[in-house]
Amino acid sequence: IVVTLVCIGVGVVINSKSKRSPAKSYYASAYVKIGKRVAMSRTEVHLVPVENPETLEKTIPLMMYEKKINEAHGYQLDVKMVANDLLKLTLRGCDKEVERVLKEMVDILIDNHRKKSKSSAVAYESFIKKLKTDAKMIQENITIIEASIIKMKKQEKKSTEQMETSARETGGEKNISDLSVVWNMLYLKTIDKEIDLSKSRQNLRNIQWQLLMYQTTIGSFNDYNTKKSGKIRLTATTPRVKS
């Protein structure tokens, strides 16, 4: 009888305590702004999201279940796109560890995206380096063409002076004819060089415009990394007790 009464008393006490303090549940939430990477084609260079936010709604839970959630039994992850490039990650569980686990998840996501962004940055920087090399080569070619034109124009002037001198001398018809041929050749070569010079200057302007546009548009890659927006918030909820 005594044992029965003791068991009943213990049961009553435990039951009353469980009614007074039901088990709490916790959830942590974080906002993540999806970064960008450089996409290049034959005609343009532009920025695109590192990964499609709509796709990430599905892929993040799968990736995190494999890496983190399977180590913490009872956790539930929810990912929702709340803006074009903003995701909300919510992790629910029965203890305060949800905050730490969610932080690790966000860090993994940010690290993965930074690697992808860095990879595209390497390709972009190589592209910019090539444009600068091309611009330098064209500028050197322009300098050579300009010097060549100046030299040929001096030769033209010299040929003209020689023709005028021969014209004043008796019997200089043959010399004038020969000098005229030389002058015409120099004149035609000068025209060709001036056409090349015009094309080279246009190509240089195009490359300089591309460099200015790309460097102004892209700017610093650090500005486009995936980042956590604000702090991770931890909330505790207590289920209602039925009377």
Image: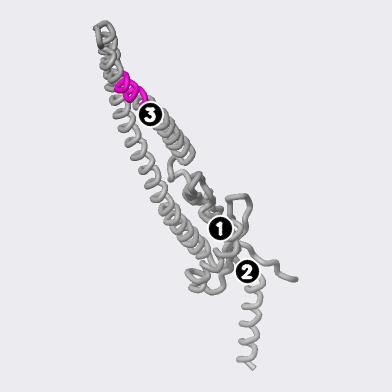
- The amino acid marked with disc number 3 is Asp
Classify 10 Å Cα crowding around label 2: few (below 14), some (14-19), many (20 and above): few
Disc on the earlier residue, 3 or 2: 2
Residue indicated by mark 3: 192
Residue indicated by mark 1: 234
- Residue 195 in which image quadrant: top left
- The amino acid marked with disc number 2 is Ser
Q: Quadrant of the C terminus?
A: bottom right
Of badges 3 and 2, nearer the viewer stands 3
Left or right, 172 with respect to 42, comes to: left
Q: Nearer the viewer, residue 47 or 6?
A: 47
Colour setting = one colour
Q: Quadrant of the N terminus?
A: bottom right
Residue 226 image position (x, y, % from top left): 49, 51
Position of residue 224 relative to residue 173, above or below, is below
Residue 80 image position (x, y, % from top left): 62, 58
Of badges 2 and 1, nearer the viewer stands 1
Give me the residue at 51% from left, 51% from top.
228
Which residue is outermost to the top?
168
Q: Nearer the viewer, residue 224 or 25?
A: 224
Distance Cα–Cα, label 2 vs label 1? 20 Å
Which residue is outermost to the right?
243
- Magenta residues? 180-188
- The amino acid marked with disc number 1 is Leu
Disc on the earlier residue, 1 or 3: 3
Position of residue 125 relative to residue 147, above or below, is below
Position of residue 89 relative to residue 178, above or below, is below
SS majority, magenta = helix
Q: Secondary structure at mark 3?
A: helix
Residue 161 image position (x, y, % from top left): 27, 11
Residue indicated by mark 2: 21
